[in-house]
Image (cartoon, helix red, strand yellow):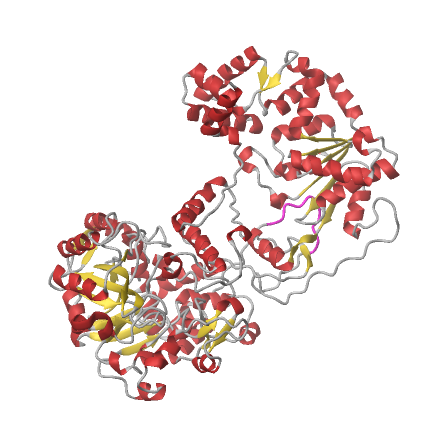
Amino acid sequence: MRFHADLHIHSKHSRATSRDCDLEHLAWWAARKGIAVVGTGDFTHPAWRPELKEKLRPAEPGLFRLAPEIEAGVAERLPRACPAGTRFMLSVEISTIYRKGERTRKVHHLIYVPDFDTANRVAARLARIGNIAADGRPILGLDSRHLLEITLEAGEGAYLVPAHIWTPWFSVLGSRSGFDSVVECYDDLAPHIFAVETGLSSDPAMNWRVAALDRFRLVSSSDAHSPAKLGREATAFDTELDYFAIRRALETGRGYVGTVEFFPEEGKYHLDGHRKCEVRLTPEETRRLDGRCPACGQPVTVGVLNRVETLADRGEDEARAAPPPCAGAVSSLVPLPEILSEITGTGTGAQAVARGYERLLGALGPELPMLEQVPVEDIERAGSPLLAEGIARLRAGRVIREAGYDGAYGTIRLFEDAELRTRTAGGLLFDAPAAPGRRRRALAEAPAERRLSPSAPGERGTPAVPLPAAPAGGGVLAGLDPEQRAAAACTDGPVAIVAGPGSGKTRVLTHRIAHLVAERGVPPAACLAVTFTRRAARELRERLAKLVPEAAPAIAVHTFHSLGLLILREHGAAAGLHRGFRIADEAERAALLAEALGLTPERARRTLAGLARAKRTQRPLVGPLAEQAAAYRRLMEERNWIDLDDLVGLAIQALESDPGLTALWHDRFRWISVDEVQDIDEQQYRLIRLLAPPPTANLCVIGDPDQAIYGFRGADAACFQRFARDYAGPTVLALRRNYRSTGTIVAAASQVVGIAELAEAVRERHERVVLHAAPSERAEAEFVVETIERLIGGHSFFSLDSGRSAGGEAGLSFGDIAVLCRTEALAVPVAEALARSGMPFRRHGHGALLDRPAVRALAAALEE
């Protein structure tokens, strides 16, 4: 029986792996890839091994398959052409670090066992040596020979394979911390090693150049940290489907077919180089430069090809012409999603790629057989002529190679860029409908849509939009660009200004108010500007003070809360308030609610949060929350307290109770400007309507519906559209030029938001944006830590063990780096990952210090 095996993978218990690295997802992806046998990975981990025992059932000798009910669930989600039935082999990768021969050695090894009893014995022995619970791939201070001895003594059939033997760090032949031969590493037990894993940055032909490797069977595996990466490399067999037959094939060659490989240039350590300086070197160039980076003079990272040449006994042509007797067949492939990505001009995670991949699996079966064996005519019928042509080129080895170096993956392409551009732009893969994209929430006709440059975010060379000349003329509006000037000069009736990011929104808002006062004769006291935060309000006041120094103190600038308080200070009785009312802070209100209703402090805070959301969204309360709300109101009234969220609601109540009050405030503020209108909630919109009644009030709203960020607080960007309906025929203007961000940031943001023309960049591009798609929050956090370690040059063993750093890359310190998270919740895994790494960091959030019990206790003690 001919089949593929991928025997080096990791579970969800290893660092920087996907949470989907469980048995169900591994089996599902293996069936889609066409892999019959998959390693379990990480069998020494104390949480993973019990899960393996629970979900796996014995199959053929030494192999396992999912329990029938679990396997049936996997099968239901597979295309008919991809049958279920993946077999599992118990496997684990062990990292050893130790001193030998006056050098520190760091070597990775793969251990395979045929049953759980043997796995238990291996785990028990290793647990006495080091911590096997911290990582699915444990790191132990153990000589490689000793580890091999433990493996051989654990039980019949157990064997060890040196992992990715050429990786510069952490491998048996690695240039940084390995040996010059397998025998030197394993000493007298080396005869028990009969196979070695070549790794992603070398292929069998490179290994054939080293005579000392002639006796070993070469194996390839994916080293997958997420299920979708299964099968990027694999080993092919033609033997019985059982553990001992696989072991025998590797030991004797009977039943061993060969390997499915990366093109070695795609591996991230194929060539030499210095990634910090973007210097990639061939071995000959490195030798000519004496191993130094020509840009900075630092030592370069010596890649796999260079290391192979150092140990080689044969030339490249000689090795290919006469492979050693143990050599197998070699099939160099590119993963199907990467092919589809190249053809469609999108990322591998794009929907077009996913749809194409699913359609091909349904029509032609699993990925590896499709790439290796399916007739190109069938591929053309199921896909497209371009896809069929690409796979034909792949099988013939006619690929374009851009080699990886110093930790940066290389690129393998099947088509030249110019060649793809000459093909039909649409229908490159399938006749799928164009993605609808998000339509901009426009209040009036948007400018004609412009397509972004097809270059990826960060690609250099796209020119910035020329800086527009300021219109002629002086006055307050001098210095504004034409769009800004038009917006600031529009002062009568309802006006909506759609202001893109970095377009000078605050500048326009303040200049418009200054123009009203200085050049249109509007009394400053008749102007009101409303914004969201005290900081924003302070900035508005400061800018107005510079534009109209004498008039600025009379211009009312408020947050929504301070505006509500202003109304209640003057007319609180109309809202049922008594003289001397005060705003209670959250700690006081939570303590009051907890004591009165018998709630825990945490439950009281959650209840308050629910009440606040209900107020902002104006949703009716039902059930226990309604009862708690009634009790809460009663308690607050008894103490003559109100909370922050009452300010807007009670102000509305006061105004609506007396039409005369509404008219009074309308006469007081005849020109009203509202900032960040996309973030206002229902209550805030009602207050604005009362102060500036439709349809003809002099009301200016400014914001950007694509920057709405407070939906979780009840904000609704639809208020922008509601304004257009309520204030019939408003004047709508747009600010499109981004003065804050470079073209790189603007292009990247446009692609993320899904809008063809989010803004026009004025600043030239200088930086590069890297888009990293992480399979899980944990993997995302680990990527953040990895990136920081690369930037600062690494700070720990794990920095090097994970390939995170080879030395300083950007000359940065910890204080130069910030990590931004969209929400507090997303910051948690990042903080945990940073803590695990040992990096010093400070976490900033929105919570007040007094919300922390320890700080409240300290403050109370200081007051006594």
Which residue sits furthest left? 156
In the image shown, does 76 or 461 lie closer to the viewer?
461
Say which residue appears at 15% left-offset and 69% top-offset: 245
The relative height of residue 344 versus residue 856 in the rendered view (above or below) is below
Residue 278 point in image, percent of width and height: 52, 70
The relative height of residue 458 versus residue 20 in the rendered view (above or below) is below
Say which residue appears at 40% left-offset and 73% top-offset: 303
Which residue sits furthest front? 102
Residue 743 point in image, percent of width and height: 64, 59
**Left or right of 56 in this view: 312:** right
Q: How many marks?
A: 0
The relative height of residue 245 versus residue 572 in the rendered view (above or below) is below
Q: Is residue 440 magenta?
A: yes
> Main SS type for the magenta part?
loop
**Left or right of 583 in this view: 626:** left
**Left or right of 9 in this view: 760:** right
**Whether residue 192 can be seen here:** no
The relative height of residue 558 versus residue 477 in the rendered view (above or below) is above
In the image, the segment drawn in magenta is 439-448
Residue 343 point in image, percent of width and height: 49, 68
In the rendered image, the quadrant that contains the N terminus is bottom left
In the image shown, does 781 or 303 lie closer to the viewer?
303
The picture quadrant where one finds residue 456 is bottom right
**Whether residue 514 can be seen here:** yes
Q: Is residue 95 magenta?
A: no
Residue 526 point in image, percent of width and height: 81, 29
**Left or right of 79 in this view: 749:** right
